[in-house]
Structure formats: C-alpha cells, structure tokens
C-alpha cells in the first residue's frame, strides 16, 4: 500500500523565518499531489496542488511546493512565515489509475512565534 | 468554496449508543467522502461515494456504515459507538473532473 510521510511532526519558528516541510510518498507511478492547511478550529483548506507541468507550484498566501519525482518528494516552502501561518499542514497524494483514494500524511503542526 | 456542512459540530455519546453524523452539500458534486482525523495520523478515509448507488469502503470502514440518501446528503453512522472512535470527523466532496476535495467544518465526536 502506498504511504505518505511527513517527517516533521512539530515545527516551531519565529516570524520571518523560512519554512520547509517535508513530504515523501511511496507510490512509483504518476501522482497528483496536494498540500492542505488546517487553521486552529477550522476545516482543511487546499493550499496548492500539482497535477502536471512545472514542478514548482505556487499556492495561496505565499506558499510554494516543489515536486521532485526522483526523490518522491513534494516539499512545502515559504520564504518568510507569519504568526497567522500557525496551523497544521497535510500533504496528500493520489496515484493516477490506482483507485480513487487520496492518502494523507500524518500532518505537521507549525507554530510561529510572534 | 463547496458549501459542505456537517451536523452536529460536537457530540458526546456513551459506549454502545448509535449515532449518526450528517453531511450535506449545495454544489451538486457527485463524489462525497467521510474521513476521521486523529493526532499524528492525518486523515483516514472511512467511506466514499461516487453517486447515490455507489458506496465504497475506505481504509478504516469497520464499525461504521454510511447512507447516501440523495446526491446532496451523505450520512455516517456508528452502530455501537466505542471509545476509540473518539475523533474529529470530516466530510468532503469533489467534482469528477479534478481531484480537489472540499472539506466540511468537521464534527468532534467523543465516546465515553
């Protein structure tokens, strides 16, 4: 079975620090990739997605992610975090032609100190 | 915004009780999903439905059942709740065109 790994479970940063959250998946074929964000007390919202084309994907709120096929990775980045970025971040993967299930990583809880 | 609503938002119930969580959507999307969220485990798929007559088990369907009463409604039932079903439950939907899911606000269920 495929799996999605987010190795950083908790990250604490100061405002203006740069952010990179790791996401690795185990499926070897073509995939669709997603990052979702869940702000405290709220539901999941789509941050960005990759389907095909340019492997550097830009999302909302200054976030971006880079798909590196050779490394089975889709890391999320932001050059300068803000206190309002405090949230939990989930990577999700859907293999094409292998069922219709979206598999989520375990999540990374980010705390940004003001 | 896919206008996914869930009721109730919070529920405390006792072991052995039957409970139903309801989900409805206003966008007319075909596909609907139920997930549970546990700390450190991300979201795990319980059941999903592609239309009223198409229900499929997800990763962790044991102890749960679902009903797709109409395209807009997808209910999750716990026939006999147990404490390890204490979790945050999310409903989601999507169109058939793009694999982008939209989530409801969640139901926090506590089984004592």
Image (cartoon, rainbow, N blue to C red):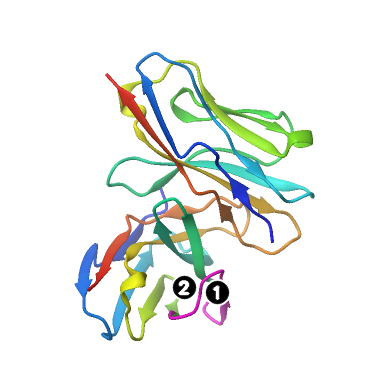
Q: Residue at x 38, y 75 (%)?
A: B75
Compared to A77, does B85 lie above or below?
below
Q: Position of residue B108 (x, y in %)?
A: 28, 62
On the image, which quarter does residue B109 sit in? bottom left
User: In the rendered image, which residue does mark 1 sit on?
Assistant: B51
As measured in the structure, the alpha-carbon distance from the residue carrying label 1 to the one carrying label 2 is: 6 Å
Q: Which residues are magenta?
A: B49-64
Q: Are marks 1 and 2 in contact (CB under 8 Å)?
A: yes
Q: Which chain hosts label 1?
A: B
Can the viewer see residue B66?
no
SS class of the residue under badge 1? Answer: strand
Q: Nearer the viewer, residue B18 or B23?
A: B18
Labels 1 and 2: the sequence-earlier one: 1
Compared to B71, does A101 lie above or below?
above
Residue B71 is tagged as 2
Residue B59 magenta-drawn? yes
SS class of the residue under badge 2? Answer: loop
Q: Residue at x 47, y 29 (%)?
A: A60
């Amino acid at each position: 079975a495929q799996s999605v790994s987010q190795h950083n479970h908790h990250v604490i940063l100061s405002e203006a620090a740069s952010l990179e959250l790791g996401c690795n998946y185990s499926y070897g074929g073509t995939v669709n990739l997603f990052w979702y964000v869940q702000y405290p007390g709220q539901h999941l919202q789509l941050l960005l997605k990759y389907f095909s084309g340019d492997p550097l994907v830009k999302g909302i709120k200054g976030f971006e992610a880079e798909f590196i096929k050779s490394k089975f990775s889709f890391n999320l980045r932001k050059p300068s975090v803000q206190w309002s970025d405090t949230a939990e971040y989930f990577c999700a993967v859907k293999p094409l032609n292998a069922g219709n299930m979206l598999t989520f990583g375990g999540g990374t809880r980010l705390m940004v100190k003001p | 915004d896919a206008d996914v609503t869930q009721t109730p938002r919070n529920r405390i119930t006792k072991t052995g009780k039957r409970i139903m969580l309801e989900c409805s959507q206003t966008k007319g999307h075909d596909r609907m999903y139920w997930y549970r969220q546990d700390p450190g485990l991300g979201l795990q798929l319980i059941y999903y439905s592609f239309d009223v007559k198409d229900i499929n088990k997800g990763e962790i369907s044991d102890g749960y059942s679902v009903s797709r009463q109409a395209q807009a409604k997808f209910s999750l039932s716990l026939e006999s709740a147990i404490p390890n079903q204490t979790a945050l439950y999310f409903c989601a939907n999507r169109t058939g065109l793009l694999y982008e899911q939209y989530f409801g606000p969640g139901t926090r269920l506590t089984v004592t």
